[in-house]
Amino acid sequence: MLRHTEYTRARLAQTSERLRASIYPETRQPDELSVSGPVGRIGWEEAQELEYRPVLPGERFGPLWATYWFRVRASVPQEWTGRRVDLLWDSGSEAALWVDGTVVQGLNHHHPDALLLERAEAGAPLSLDVELACNSMFGQLEAPAELHRCELALFDPEAWQLFFDFETLRALEASDAVDPSLAGLLRSELERFSDLWPGDDARALLPPLYEHRNGTHAHEVGAIGHAHLDTAWLWPLAESYRKAVRTFATQTRYMDEYPEYRFACSQAVHYAWIKERNPDLWARIRAKVEAGQFVPVGGSWVEPDCNLPSGEALLRQFLHGQRFFERELGARCREFWSPDAFGYAGQLPQLLREVGITRFLTQKLSWNRFNRPEHHTFVWQGVDGSEVLGHFPPADTYSSAATVPELLRTAREYADHEHSGTSLLVYGYGDGGGGPTRSMLETLRRTRDLQGLPRTASRTSDEFFQALEAEPGERPVVVGELYFEYHRGTYTSQAETKRL
């Protein structure tokens, strides 16, 4: 056995890459791949009437904001009978997979694979359509969209599970926070695994390592998926709708595969877009809301700026938002979910109380350079004495990747261990939508109760705040405005534009 830790870790990293490569042991090019465009933001039905031409990987597509539709036609190879088949896609841009007129899932750099068949039948035809948007998750592309990959792939579920079993333990061993004796055990057993894999004896080494549980007391992390989507930022408003479609289609699909998964989604306007324009996806969302997996939060029509609008304007935000959620989804929101908006005026607690909201979440104040918040869990008291329960996720992000280091940081940085034993992790790619990945969900399955890490459980926002409210003892009280210094000058720069 190597005694130099850095060399051992380098070897374990190589083993991890070999395991990752084994997840898709075989790939095939489609029988037919053709494209039509550029076109506008048309629907699937209109795309069926377009003229298509053959296309090969390596071709580039533009200009910015244009749309192309791809036809992918294939049949299942005989030797893949009974196995799972996925689509692997990489265009360096955003895209959406459609099957028989239904949007199945978004495709992008973070979500490059999509389940096609759980148990394939030999010769079964595959008729797929991919809607390519010539923009990245953050808007403008640095280079034109380029079709790097469009393949059918044979998925190995055992290799998938083995990779995450190994990778989660490898990340834990590499952390500085883990107990040295546990780190040594992990390092030794993972190296033995590297010696034996791909032999059957290697697989038996990992499950016992997951039997090392936390003791009688450990910090608890409630984990909830999220896909922050700025309604209007670095892309046209029309693209925001398509981003919502791609994001919601992906996440509702993951909910089928991961029943424990909980996904928080704010901004009633995004729901309204889907209800009006995509009834199939709207039905999926409503079903997942009823199942408790798709969780409406925030109570507002959009996530509003809370500095410039008047009190009446803010109340109208919540009036329209809460009415929509109650009418369409059966319940009002109880928390103001504002991870990335501007302004935390001292009048907000009073306004929130007026619309039935008693809880508040943001992350943005962690960006303060000089006056960082003293607390992560606290009572926020407004200028009139109204109070709401506030929480800042201690990972200092609303787009966590749900990695082992971020879980450790959540517990380590939490500022209120004296009066609270739980905090929230908000994970999933955001700002331009996207949301959690299957990799994040697999990691969280393995970190529920693992020695060296905080206990982790998928929770809705309501379940998390209920746990906070049930904790005994007094909480610190913060009075008045929560000042966000990082965006100083936002309202004075480009002032004429902001008056429009």
Image: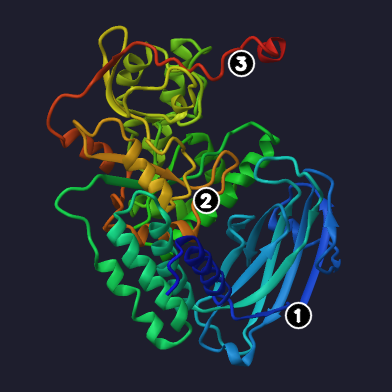
In this orientation, which residue lies closer to the viewer: 8 or 53? 8
For label 3, count other residues whose C-alpha is less than 10 Å away and answer few (under 14), some (14-19) or many (20+): few
Sort mark 2 into few (<14), some (14-19) or many (20+) by Cα contacts within 10 Å. many
Q: Measure how far apart labels 3 and 1 are at the Cα level.
A: 53 Å
Q: Locate residue 463, reporting x and y percent.
A: 26, 43
Q: Which image quarter: residue 155?
A: bottom right
Residue under the point 32% across and 67% down: 185
Work out whether residue 362 can be spotted: yes
Circle 3 SS class? loop
Q: Nearer the viewer, residue 278 or 248?
A: 248
Q: Amino acid at mark 3?
A: Thr
- x and y percent of residue 495 in the render? 68, 10
Q: Amino acid at mark 2?
A: Phe
The quarter in which the C terminus is drawn is top right
Residue at which label 2 appears: 248
In the picture as drawn, the residue positioned furthest to the front comes out as 3
Q: Which residue is mark 1?
A: 31
Q: Quadrant of residue 411?
A: top left
Residue marked by disc 3: 490
In screen coordinates, is 363 left or right of 216? Answer: right
Taking 465 as reference, is 142 left or right? right
Up/down of 198 relative to 384, above or below: below
